[in-house]
Amino acid sequence: MDNVRVRFAPSPTGPLHIGGVRTALYTYLIAKKYKGDFILRIEDTDQNRYVEGAEDYIIRSLEWCGITPDEGPGFGGDYGPYRQSERKDIYGKYAKQLVEAGKAYYAFDSAEEISEMRTRLEAEGNRAPKYDHSSRLSMKNSLTLTEKETADLLASSDDVIVRLKIEPGEEIVVNDIIRGEVKFNSSELDDKVLLKADGMPTYHMANIVDDKLMKISHVIRGEEWLPSTAHHVLLYRALGWEETMPKFAHLSLLLKPNGKGKLSKRDGAKFGFPVFPLEWKAETEEDSFTGFREFGFDPKATVNFLAFLGWNPGTEQEIFTIEELAEAFNLDQIVKSGARFDIDKAKWYNQQYIINSDNKDIAAYLKVFDAETYEKVSDEYLEEFVGLMKERVELYGDFYDSGYYFFEDIKSYEEKMIRKKWKDHRPEKFAKFSEQLSTNKFSSESLKGELEAFIKEEEIGYGDIMPFLRLATTGTMQGPDLFQTMELLGKEKSLKRLGEGLNHFNQVVS
């Protein structure tokens, strides 16, 4: 494909849902695959729903995922402005053009009058009352008023809007890249508002005009916009742009983990996982959300996971860099059915990225992820810690959760083993071996060798002492190699813990 220009056009009405990130990712991959342009356009025409900080959040979320726009607010480009609120005059021009061509009309109805019309139509048995070809001639608009009445109202009324004039009986065919041929009949469509009373365009008007002027070649968006595509095609026709309108691809929904219903922003709290890329802080706890980043996900793993929610390359390969995704990606490989949001699969992807990442890179990320914990140790210590732990974790937060004892004193001991087996000769042998270690050079090899020699000399088994060495050192029976752990902790700290463990074990069974 030549001259590929695609756009991601979110509304700054709150945090960017992870489904929106998937849309942005698919859009970005198409741009990169065909060496085209990925444009970020902020659709802020609904000023009543505008949320301070949302635009910045969107940009930071995309950048965290490595989805960097070629054009957009703060990124430059030759087709700006890239905020719709800054393009108000452009839309007014085309709305006026449509009215003059008889493709649209001015409407002066108040909200109360529209409500009365719907009530009347419902009473007449109309189950879907709307402002359309069957009702518009009973309303206050430039189709029913004289030119003078229309001119007077344009000069004096605060309720002036522009509506698209849709004629009944017209077939609209949309050839969707994912869904194939989709047909609509104009008789079922309402006369959509194009320009609101405040002079701002609706999504429908702004979307069409901007896509045309920004030379957008493909529109990739969620399936909830598929019904609106009929209006958009008619609007392209009305403006004389049908021959150059972009190709459409409507993505399937992201579904809840149980596969029942669309994944909503509240499902994160309900199911215990994030549904936003980054943390979002609001005035109320109910409207504040954690993010994939804060939950401990790697951005590259997150992108890899999202790519497979509705798309498959047709091979056995599952781990892709974003560059490899761009090379392999095709819109016609996207499935029509909804994609179940499997958080366990997301964790699996994250685990693979951690295991296969360089210890130095992980250590550097951890210092950003949790500076308070990891800044107090040397880079060398942290890298060795990562090497011991990375095959035992799924998320970045697991490094500390499973290995806190590398950074602070033991908080508690798993006492089941102590109560069951801390008896007979074990306390004596543990104390004797602990004292013997005071002369050890504390390399993992020397520690292992000394324990093997001690067991042989004392004629005891590993189970008589090894579990208690681990419990005293870490507080848990789980963890990486004990001798490597003791080497990293160092002689002074390890011996101190063995002494504290001995005292605690004796207290537990006393």
Image: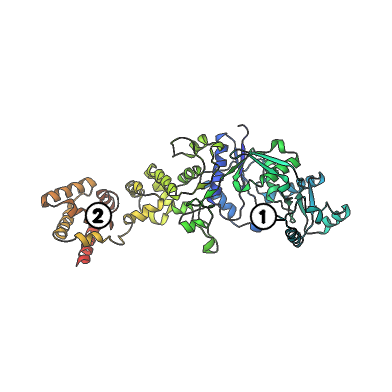
Q: Position of residue 118 (x, y in %)?
A: 73, 59
Binning the other alpha carbons within 10 Å of mark 2 as few (below 14), some (14 to 19) or many (20 upward) gives many
Q: Earlier in the sequence, mark 2 or mark 1?
A: 1
Q: Which residue is mark 1?
A: 46
Q: Is residue 144 left or right of residue 29?
A: right
Residue at horizontal 52 percent and vertical 50 percent from the top:
255
Tell me, yes or no, if residue 75 can be seen here.
Answer: no
Q: Position of residue 155 (x, y in %)?
A: 83, 56
Quadrant location of the C terminus? Answer: bottom left
Label drawn at residue 369: none
Tell me, yes or no, if residue 461 can be seen here.
Answer: yes
The chosen color scheme is: rainbow
Residue at horizontal 77 percent and vertical 50 percent from the top:
133
Q: Is residue 11 left or right of residue 461?
A: right
Vertical position of residue 113 compared to residue 342: above or below: below
Q: Nearer the viewer, residue 318 or 278?
A: 318
Element carrying mark 1? loop
Q: Position of residue 357 (x, y in %)?
A: 39, 42
Q: Which residue is mark 2?
A: 470
Q: Among all residues in the image, which is located at the extreme front? A: 125
Binning the other alpha carbons within 10 Å of mark 1 as few (below 14), some (14 to 19) or many (20 upward) gives some
Identity, as a three-letter code, of the amino acid under mark 1: Asp
Q: Nearer the viewer, residue 89 or 189?
A: 189
Identity, as a three-letter code, of the amino acid under mark 2: Arg
Quadrant location of the N terminus? Answer: top right
Element carrying mark 2? helix
Q: Nearer the viewer, residue 466 or 431?
A: 466
Q: Nearer the viewer, residue 268 or 336?
A: 336
Q: Is residue 294 left or right of residue 407?
A: right
